[in-house]
């Protein structure tokens, strides 16, 4: 299985620069259903996953779990 590129995603970088931009909002919206993002988040250590969830306000991942 190949390594995820979610940590280097161009749309994610756009969101980081300007969360209200169209492409930034598109990235944020797609994180709710993207299988790659879900796999990436599950692959992270709990503290890293929670930190990202809090940074991007993703309540689905803002908890201890698998």
Image (cartoon, rainbow, N blue to C red):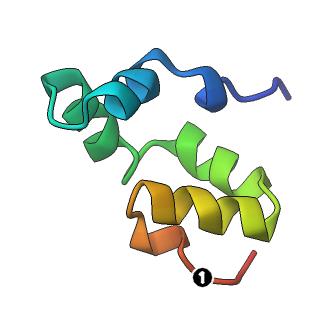
Question: Which image quadrant for residue 65?
Answer: bottom right
Which quadrant, please, contains the N terminus?
A: top right
Question: Is 54 on the left or on the right of 26, as rendered?
Answer: right
Above/below status of 40 relative to 44: above
Residue at 41% x, 64% y is 58
Which quadrant, please, contains the C terminus?
A: bottom right
Question: Is 9 on the left or on the right of 21, as rendered?
Answer: right
Above/below status of 45 relative to 15: below
Which residue in the structure is indicated by mark 1? 63
Q: Residue furthest top?
A: 10
Q: Secondary structure at mark 1?
A: loop
Above/below status of 29 relative to 49: above
Q: Position of residue 22 (x, y in %)?
A: 14, 25
Q: Residues within 10 Å of mark 1 (few under 14, many from 20)?
A: some
Residue at 62% x, 62% y is 51
Question: Is 38 on the left or on the right of 21, as rendered?
Answer: right
Q: Position of residue 10 (x, y in %)?
A: 46, 16
Residue at 73% x, 59% y is 48
Q: Position of residue 36 (x, y in %)?
A: 58, 38
Give the camera-side residue of 45 and 1: 45
């Amino acid at each position: 299985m190949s390594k995820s590129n979610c940590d280097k995603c161009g749309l994610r970088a756009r969101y980081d620069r300007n969360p209200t931009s169209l492409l930034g909002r598109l990235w944020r919206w797609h994180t709710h259903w993207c299988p790659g993002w879900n796999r990436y988040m599950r692959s992270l250590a709990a503290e890293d996953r929670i930190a990202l969830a809090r940074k991007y306000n993703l309540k689905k991942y803002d908890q201890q779990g698998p």
